[in-house]
Image (tube, rainbow, N blue to C red):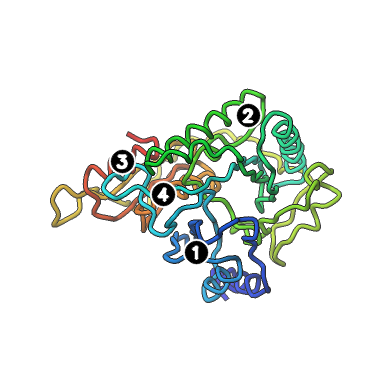
Amino acid sequence: MSETEHEEAVLKAWYAQPDVLDLTWLAHPSRHHVRWRQTGGRWVMATRRFSGGPSLQRHLMERPPADLYVSTSAWLDPVNLPGLRDETKPAPVLLDHLVVFDLDLGPFSRKRLEEVRQRTSKLIHWLEAHTDLALMHVSFSGAKGFHVVLSDPDRTPFAEPDPRTREQAVRAHRQTLLQRVVAAGHAVDTTVTADTRRIIRVPGSLHGRTKWACAVLPEGQIHRPLRTWVMGLPKADTALPLPKRPPREPKQKSTPKASKKKRGLTLGLEVSTHVVGTKDRTAVVALLPSKVNEQNELERTLAALPDDAAPLATFEVDGRYLLVVPRAFPRSRAIAVLEGMGLK
């Protein structure tokens, strides 16, 4: 059995369990966008709505996902959402947006998880004391941290009738909150909270790398020491072991002098943005910033791409990632996709 076949067998066994996916924390699951990554790395956007965890699980049974995500926003129509900067299509109608804080600290170990647990606990106490947000739940991400999910009783930004202006108002409202949290000294992922197009892991789904499950924690558990409950978290039989401490970084060895021997054959890859046979059309080819140098950072970057940026492929070269979206985009749209990634 190949490695891919083994992974697919593990995933099928996991998702064959009854009611493993939990969407009960969403008031209207069918208003949320769903996206997943297959074992081969391909991203798939749902082309239908799901009434809850069971219907989503049935849909995925034939080919279970390596990673499964749901949007933090509720939409009038969550299927085929246009990109945030795509003005060629009508703006989607945003109905609600959950407040989510993502706290991570790697490498994957008990020591790091306990540190981020303490940070998460302090954040929740601060939010309770300084905001009117209502805590819905805290979930273990399945790897290096936790998601704090809250609802906001302040519906002021949603009073804006124009859909495009409304989404911008919600983003600005969340950004103000995020700035307060950061100013108070809380180390949260600043790319998550104010992003109305953000997706987070579905509770009950497996983390593709660790094979630990994303899991909603019982109320108050985040305030108790990790050692008292961590080994009770759900995970697959093939899950990565959770070491007590992060591995020590090996000492850097001195770089040997370059050999004067003739080099062997090398494989090169040439990519062109020009789409043959088209006019004013271009593919998206981008070398991602050097800060995107870990798998979880790459996943966040890809997850934040607009829905029409698919299919896509990534290539790793000297610690950096080359992103290729082989589609015939109008030049203006390709530029918008790149600018949306912070690239010029």
* Picture quarter with the N terminus: bottom right
Q: In the drawing, what numbered circle is on residue 168?
A: none
Residue 344 seen by the camera: yes
> Residue flagged by tag 1: what amino acid is it?
Gln
Of the image marks 4 and 2, the number of the one nearer the N terminus: 4
Of the image marks 3 and 1, the number of the one nearer the N terminus: 1
Q: Are marks 2 and 3 in contact (CB under 8 Å)?
A: no
Task: From the image, tell me which residue sits under label 1.
Answer: 38
**SS under mark 4:** loop
| Relative horizontal placement of residue 135, taking residue 231 as reference (left or right) | left
Q: Circle 1: is it few (<14), some (14-19), or many (20+) Cα within 10 Å?
A: some
Task: From the image, tell me which residue sits under label 4.
Answer: 93
Task: Measure how far apart labels 4 and 2 are at the Cα level.
Answer: 28 Å
| Relative horizontal placement of residue 194, taking residue 289 as reference (left or right) | right
Task: From the image, tell me which residue sits under label 3.
Answer: 336
Q: Are marks 2 and 1 in contact (CB under 8 Å)?
A: no
Task: Measure how far apart labels 2 and 1 are at the Cα level.
Answer: 35 Å
- Closest to the observer: 174 or 273? 174
Residue at the farthest right position: 228
The residue mark sitting in front, 2 or 1, is 2
**SS under mark 2:** helix
